[in-house]
C-alpha cells in the first residue's frame, strides 16, 4: 500500500503487503449552506443569550479576542460578520479593540494578520498583538475558587463587553478547544496560563481528550467568566480543513457545550483495532512541536500498549520558539516533571505539556520524522529520530515484525479515535 502525507516535502510511504493496514481519515460533510450563511444564522439565533445587536449598546468599549495563525479558525469569515453586528448595534469603530489571543505563542507578523483577519479589518481597526511576558499589560480580575490570581490582558479587564471568536475542536489538555479558552489561556499572563495547564496532571490518563467535563475545562470556564467574557462565536471545522461544518454563538458555556456535541459527532473516527504501529501526521497543527504533540496524542489513541507511533510533521518553527524546555528538559518521566514543578524548577505551563507527553511515552515508543527539528534536539526531547517516513517504518517493522498491524491516520490532529466494538 502507498500512503501519501498532506505535505509536499515528505515522500509517499510504501507499506509491505505482509502488514495488516487500515487507513482512517475524517469523513467529509456536505453543508447545505455557505460558510457565511452558517455563521450569520448562528449570530442571529444565539444560544443562551440575546444577539449582539440586543446585548451591546452604543458607547460600550468592546474587545474581541481572536485566535492567532496557529489555529485554522475561519476568523476571516466570522470576525467581519461580528463587526457588522456591532455596527448595527451602534458601536463606533473607535470603541472596538481586536486582541490576538496568543496565550504563550509568539506574536503574529503583519503578513499573517491580513489573511487571518482580512486586509480591511487590519487597516480599519485597532489590533493588539500582545507580549505574554510583559506583566505590565496584564491585570488581576479576581481569585479562582482555588485561590490563585486570575490575570488577563488589560484590553479584556478594561472592556465593557468581551467577545470571543474561536474554534471548537478536541484538545488534549482542555478536553475541547474554543469557548472560554480564547480568554484563558488565550489572553492571560504566563502564571495564569500555567495554573490552568498544570491542572491536567490531576486527571487520570484518558479522561481529558474530547471530554468537556474535566477540572481543566472547569477552571477555563470559571476564569473566563470572571474575566468578563460575555459572548462567543465558534466554528467547527469541516474535514477538508478550509470550510465550516457548523457555527455556535451565544453564552460562553452553553454555546460551547453545543459546539462540543457537534465535534463529537463530526470528528469521531471508529477504528477496527489498536495497531502495533500507527503512522500519523499532525496537519494542520504542525507549525512547531508544541502544536504537533496534538497529532501524536491522537495517534496514541490508535496504538496498542508497547507499540510504536510514527509522527510526521514539518515543524518549520522547530520545537517551540517560546518554550526552550522542550529540548533542554525534554519529555522526561512524569514523576520527574511533577517533582520539578513542585520544586519551582519548571514552569507549570511547560510542565503540563511535558507531563502529558511523558504519559504517552510510558505506553508506546515514539519516532519523530520532521525537517524542522534536528536529530540532536529530537533525541533531547525523548523521541527516536528518523530522517524520513520510510526509515521510521523500517525501524518499527524490525521491532514488531513484517506482519505487524498498521493504522494510518491522515490529518490526525482533529480526530477523535474510538474502537468500533
Image: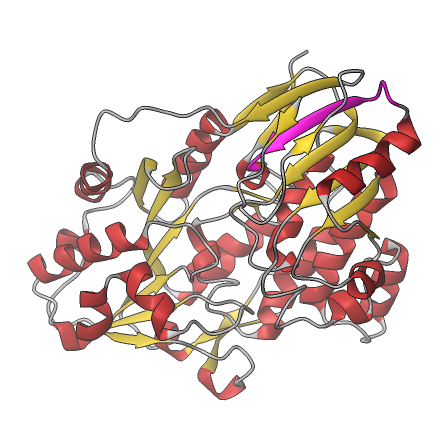
Outermost residue toward the top?
421
Horizontal and vertical percent position of residue 64: 30, 64
Q: Nearer the viewer, residue 273 or 350?
A: 273
**Residue 61's image quarter?**
bottom left
Please report the bounds of the magenta region as a residue range: 402-411
Horizontal and vertical percent position of residue 5: 58, 38
Which quadrant would the C terminus be assigned to in this image?
A: top right
Which quadrant would the N terminus be assigned to in this image?
A: top right
Q: How many marks?
A: 0
**Residue 32's image quarter?**
top left
Q: Main secondary structure of the magenta part?
A: strand
Horizontal and vertical percent position of residue 58: 10, 68
**In this picture, residue 192 sits left or right of residue 158:** right
**In this picture, residue 155 sits left or right of residue 274:** left
Above-or-below relation of 342 to 31? below
Residue 403 colored in magenta in the image: yes
Q: Nearer the viewer, residue 64 or 268?
A: 268
Horizontal and vertical percent position of residue 330: 81, 63
Q: Nearer the viewer, residue 210 or 48?
A: 210
Residue 82 colored in magenta in the image: no
Q: Residue sitting at 70 percent across and 57 percent down?
A: 353
Amino acid at each position: 500500500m502507498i500512503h501519501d502525507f498532506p505535505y509536499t516535502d515528505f515522500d509517499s510511504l510504501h507499506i509491505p503487503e505482509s502488514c495488516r493496514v487500515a487507513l482512517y481519515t475524517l469523513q467529509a460533510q456536505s453543508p447545505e449552506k455557505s460558510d457565511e450563511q452558517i455563521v450569520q444564522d448562528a449570530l442571529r439565533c444565539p444560544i443562551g443569550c440575546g444577539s449582539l445587536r440586543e446585548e451591546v449598546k452604543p458607547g460600550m468599549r468592546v474587545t474581541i479576542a481572536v485566535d492567532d495563525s496557529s489555529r485554522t479558525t475561519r476568523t476571516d469569515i466570522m470576525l467581519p460578520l461580528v463587526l457588522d453586528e456591532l455596527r448595527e448595534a451602534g458601536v463606533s469603530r473607535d470603541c472596538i479593540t481586536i486582541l490576538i489571543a496568543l496565550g504563550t505563542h509568539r506574536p503574529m507578523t503583519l503578513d499573517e494578520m491580513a489573511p487571518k483577519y482580512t486586509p480591511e479589518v487590519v487597516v480599519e481597526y485597532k489590533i493588539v498583538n500582545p507580549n505574554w511576558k510583559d506583566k505590565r499589560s496584564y491585570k488581576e480580575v479576581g481569585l479562582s475558587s482555588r485561590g490563585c490570581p486570575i490575570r488577563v490582558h488589560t484590553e479584556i479587564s478594561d472592556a465593557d463587553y468581551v467577545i470571543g471568536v474561536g474554534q471548537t475542536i478536541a484538545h488534549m489538555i482542555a478536553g475541547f478547544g474554543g469557548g472560554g479558552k480564547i480568554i484563558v489561556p488565550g489572553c492571560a499572563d504566563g502564571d495564569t496560563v500555567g495554573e490552568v495547564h498544570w491542572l491536567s496532571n490531576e486527571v487520570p490518563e484518558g479522561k481529558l481528550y474530547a471530554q468537556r467535563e474535566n477540572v481543566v475545562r472547569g477552571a477555563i470556564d470559571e476564569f473566563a467568566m470572571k474575566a468578563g467574557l460575555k459572548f462567543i462565536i465558534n466554528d467547527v471545522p469541516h474535514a477538508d480543513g478550509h470550510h465550516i461544518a457548523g457555527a455556535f454563538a451565544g453564552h460562553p458555556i452553553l454555546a460551547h457545550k453545543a459546539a462540543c456535541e457537534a465535534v463529537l459527532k463530526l470528528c469521531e473516527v471508529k477504528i477496527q483495532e489498536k495497531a502495533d504501529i500507527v503512522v500519523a501526521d499532525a496537519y494542520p497543527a504542525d507549525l512547531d512541536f508544541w502544536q504537533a504533540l496534538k497529532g501524536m496524542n491522537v495517534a496514541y489513541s490508535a496504538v496498542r500498549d508497547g507499540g510504536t507511533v510514527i509522527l510526521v510533521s514539518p515543524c518549520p518553527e522547530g520545537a517551540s520558539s517560546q518554550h526552550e524546555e522542550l529540548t533542554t528538559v525534554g519529555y522526561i518521566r512524569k514523576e520527574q516533571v511533577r517533582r520539578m514543578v513542585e520544586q519551582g524548577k519548571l514552569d507549570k505551563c511547560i510542565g503540563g505539556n511535558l507531563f502529558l507527553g511523558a504519559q504517552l511515552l510510558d505506553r508506546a515508543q515514539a519516532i519523530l520524522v520532521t525537517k524542522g527539528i534536528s536529530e540532536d534536539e529530537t533525541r533531547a526531547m525523548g523521541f527516536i529520530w528518523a530522517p524520513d517516513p520510510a526509515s521510521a517504518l523500517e525501524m518499527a517493522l524490525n521491532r514488531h515484525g513484517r506482519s505487524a498491524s498498521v493504522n494510518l491516520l491522515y490529518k490526525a490532529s482533529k480526530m477523535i479515535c474510538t474502537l468500533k466494538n
